[in-house]
Image: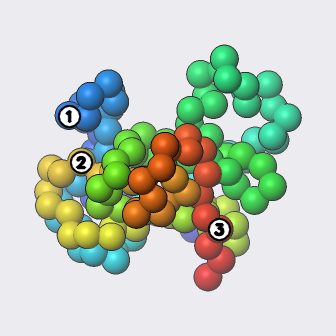
Amino acid sequence: MIEIESTSKLFVGESKIRNAGKGVFAKKSIAEGEVIENCPVIEVSLKDPANNDDGTLVDYFFYFGDGLAIALGFGSLYNHSYNPNATYKVNLKNNTIDFIAIKNIDANDEITVNYNFGVPTDTSTPTVRGVPTFND
């Protein structure tokens, strides 16, 4: 079994992004390229009743392999930005969604990702769910 350690790098607070609610923030500086968090997931079938437009959880799903997943840890609380300081990737081998800094992040900065499959430069309307596959 793969061991996944929790992180002391992060905290959850009120986001300054309009209508975002909570967000994930750096407790200390995080360097570009550094792994921010490896989030274990709960896998969910595409046919699960929670996967409908009226469900509350539908906004928190990620595409994961042939199905969906809810990211544990702080994984489902990162907010969207077209100027993100992090990205995320599916790691099917470890059954995680991994968040990685793409810029240096200062202590107390909110950590954001582009919801368009983690592609930082994609400026199209956000895809609410989905991440690229990563198998190292």
Q: Give left or right: position of 98 versus 104.
A: right
For label 3, the SS is loop
For label 2, the SS is strand
Distance from label 2 to label 1 (Cα)? Answer: 8 Å
Q: Position of residue 60 (x, y in %)?
A: 56, 37
Q: Is residue 74 above or below residue 84?
A: above
Type of residue at label 3? Thr
Residue occupying the far front of the picture? 124
To which residue does mark 2 refer?
110
- Toward the viewer: 130 or 108? 130
Point out the tag, 2 or 1, that comes first from the N-terminus: 1
In the rendered image, which quarter is residue 107 located in?
A: bottom left
Residue 97 shows up from this direction: no
To which residue does mark 3 refer?
133
Q: Is residue 56 above or below residue 123?
A: above
Point out the tag, 2 or 3, that comes first from the N-terminus: 2
- The disc label shown at residue 16, or none: 1
Residue occupying the far right of the picture? 47
Residue 68 shows up from this direction: yes
Please identify the quadrant where the C terminus is shown. Answer: bottom right
Q: Position of residue 7 (x, y in %)?
A: 36, 58
Distance from label 1 to label 3 (Cα)? Answer: 30 Å
In the rendered image, which quarter is residue 102 located in?
A: bottom left
Q: Give left or right: position of 15 versus 7.
A: left
For label 1, the SS is loop
Q: Are marks 1 and 3 in contact (CB under 8 Å)?
A: no
Neighbourhood count class around disc 3 (C-alpha, 10 Å): few under 14, some 14–19, many 20 upward: some
Q: Residue at x 61, y 51 (%)?
A: 130
Q: Residue at x 48, y 49 (%)?
A: 124
Type of residue at label 1? Lys
Q: Position of residue 41 (x, y in %)?
A: 63, 50
